[in-house]
Image (cartoon, grey):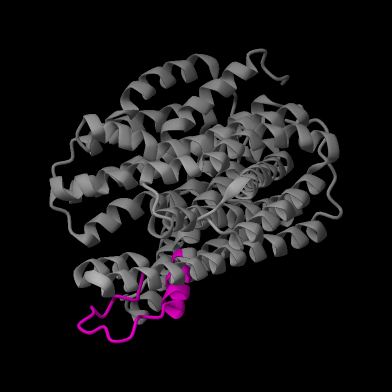
């Protein structure tokens, strides 16, 4: 089938469908204080309200992607949008923390139906590899811009409305997106086979959620090592059982041989490491700017704008560059530039940033965005068209796991580096036991101490955090630098796809 004439209108429809889903990943963070007071939520309930969405997404994306290949991506997309709409209304008017957690579960269910279907629709719609690269770049731009817009949109809504408005904003968007998708996304006969059964799907979902939960909780202080260990072993055992079922089946639910394609396996690794590093770096720089440099949240957000704007520009640029010089060269060079930019930022003085730090922020945003888009092009360009939903779900899972685990890993690294670096002024007594655990807790203790001792404590905290901030950024630079070398070697035999990968 040739590419539809209105393919760019189809792209617009699926990008609009993706926008509220990606904004929902970050919009809630700024609403936490408001909903905590309104619902009387405990600290544990707040953690579940935030974590349940990405946790469920991590488990649901792959089963939903393979199901979409079997029943049709258009049907899955439209159904997922309706579920997301209804769950948004339920979340906005949730009367308790438990109800909000339940609504967030349903939100993740709808979103996990939509995301793989969007990528599969792009794969079906754009048969020309050059156009597909540009389309995936534009899709990546929506992802970058949406994630950045989340806190800004949430802040604006909370200035004028109650906390539920951060969910209710999805309603008018969906009322526009659903008819547009209905009339523009073409109907196609499903190409995917495979034996999709609810038992295998539940096995995969339970295995992924248990494994991810164990990894995240294992990084946090105060969790039981026994419970974490048992959960991790159980999750991995379920995943091994699922993999054995798939390898023995003549018609597997998820074709694990997709991972034998170097472009797909390396695309997944790029998505994991780059999205994780970016999430951890943004979290660290935001804290450095506010706690150490003394900028307001708005000033910190404006300081980050060069990174955000460059990220938005990198997606479409990656499509052009890939068609011009090849995927391998673009992926390796973008990762190498990102590593150099991170190293430069790790050694920079944010008190007197100058044009150098701004230039490093721009090159970091541009190179990481190009690298992430290169991973999309690698995965979706190398996947057989009848398995586009499965490939799309694998990529989306890479982003979800990378961002979630990246914040956890770099957050723990930041705390450990800070605790090791801080030198508490001598002579201070009656300090809280947790005063040296994080810069936020040190600042709270300094406020309680007051006077000259409090100022000395603040100075110690800022010096320690600057050291810890450098450690995090240099660690991220090292990871991405190593990844650049791995990609250079792994894709040495990669050949650019020409036309369709598989006939249908």
Furthest residue to the front? Answer: 452
Q: Give the mark count.
A: 0
Q: Residue 321, image x and y in percent?
A: 78, 36
Q: Residue at x 72, y 39 (%)?
A: 381
- Report the side of 375 relative to 14 (left or right): right
Q: Residue 125, image x and y in percent?
A: 65, 25
Q: Which residues are magenta?
A: 411-438
423 in magenta? yes
Q: Is residue 84 above or below residue 357?
A: above
Q: Is residue 297 above or below residue 132?
A: below
Q: Is residue 333 visible?
A: yes
Query: Quick one: 85 or 359, which is closer to the camera?
Result: 359
- Report the side of 336 relative to 209 (left or right): right
Q: Residue at x 39, y 73 (%)?
A: 460
Magenta: main secondary structure equals: loop
Q: Residue at x 64, y 49 (%)?
A: 356
């Amino acid at each position: 089938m040739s590419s539809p004439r209105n393919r760019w209108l189809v792209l617009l429809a699926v990008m609009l469908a993706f926008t509220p889903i990606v904004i929902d990943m970050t919009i809630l963070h700024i609403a936490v204080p408001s909903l905590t007071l309104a619902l009387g939520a405990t600290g544990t309930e707040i953690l579940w309200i935030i974590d349940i969405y990405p946790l469920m997404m991590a488990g649901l994306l792959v089963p939903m992607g393979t199901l979409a290949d079997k029943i049709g991506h258009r049907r899955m997309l439209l159904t997922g949008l309706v579920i997301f709409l209804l769950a948004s209304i339920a979340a906005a008017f949730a009367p308790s923390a438990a109800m909000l957690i339940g609504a967030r579960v349903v939100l993740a269910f709808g979103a996990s139906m939509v995301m793989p279907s969007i990528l599969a629709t792009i794969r079906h719609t754009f048969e020309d590899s050059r156009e597909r690269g540009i389309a995936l770049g534009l899709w990546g731009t929506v992802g970058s811009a949406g994630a950045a817009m989340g806190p800004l949109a949430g802040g604006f809504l909370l200035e004028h409305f109650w906390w539920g408005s951060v969910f209710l904003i999805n309603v008018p968007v969906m009322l526009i997106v659903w008819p547009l998708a209905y009339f523009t996304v073409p109907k196609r006969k499903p190409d995917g086979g495979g034996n999709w059964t609810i038992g295998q799907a539940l096995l995969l979902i339970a295995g992924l959620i248990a494994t991810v939960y164990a990894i995240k909780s294992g990084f946090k202080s105060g969790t039981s090592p026994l419970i974490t260990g048992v959960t991790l072993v159980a999750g991995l055992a379920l995943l091994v059982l699922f993999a054995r079922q798939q390898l023995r089946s003549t018609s597997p639910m998820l074709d694990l041989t997709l991972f034998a394609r170097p472009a797909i396996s390396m695309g997944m690794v790029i998505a994991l490491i780059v999205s994780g590093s970016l999430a951890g770096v943004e979290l660290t720089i935001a804290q450095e700017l506010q706690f150490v440099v003394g900028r307001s949240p708005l000033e910190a957000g404006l300081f980050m704008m060069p990174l955000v704007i460059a990220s938005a520009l990198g997606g479409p640029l990656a499509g052009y560059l890939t068609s011009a010089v090849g995927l391998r060269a673009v992926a390796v060079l973008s990762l190498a530039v990102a590593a150099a930019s991170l190293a430069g930022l790790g050694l920079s003085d944010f008190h007197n940033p100058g044009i150098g730090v701004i230039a490093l922020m721009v090159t970091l945003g541009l190179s990481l965005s190009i690298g992430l888009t290169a991973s999309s092009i690698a995965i979706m360009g190398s996947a057989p068209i009848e398995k586009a939903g499965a490939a799309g779900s694998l990529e989306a899972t890479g982003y979800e796991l990378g961002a979630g685990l990246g914040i956890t890993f770099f957050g723990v690294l930041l705390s450990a580096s800070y605790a090791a670096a801080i030198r508490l002024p001598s002579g201070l007594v009656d300090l809280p036991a947790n005063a040296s655990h994080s810069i936020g807790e040190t600042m709270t203790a300094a406020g309680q101490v007051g006077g000259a001792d409090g100022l000395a404590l603040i100075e110690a905290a800022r010096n320690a955090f600057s050291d810890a901030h450098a450690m995090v950024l240099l660690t991220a630079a090292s990871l991405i630098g190593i990844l650049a070398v791995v990609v250079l070697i792994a894709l040495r035999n990669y050949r650019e796809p020409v036309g369709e990968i598989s006939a249908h």
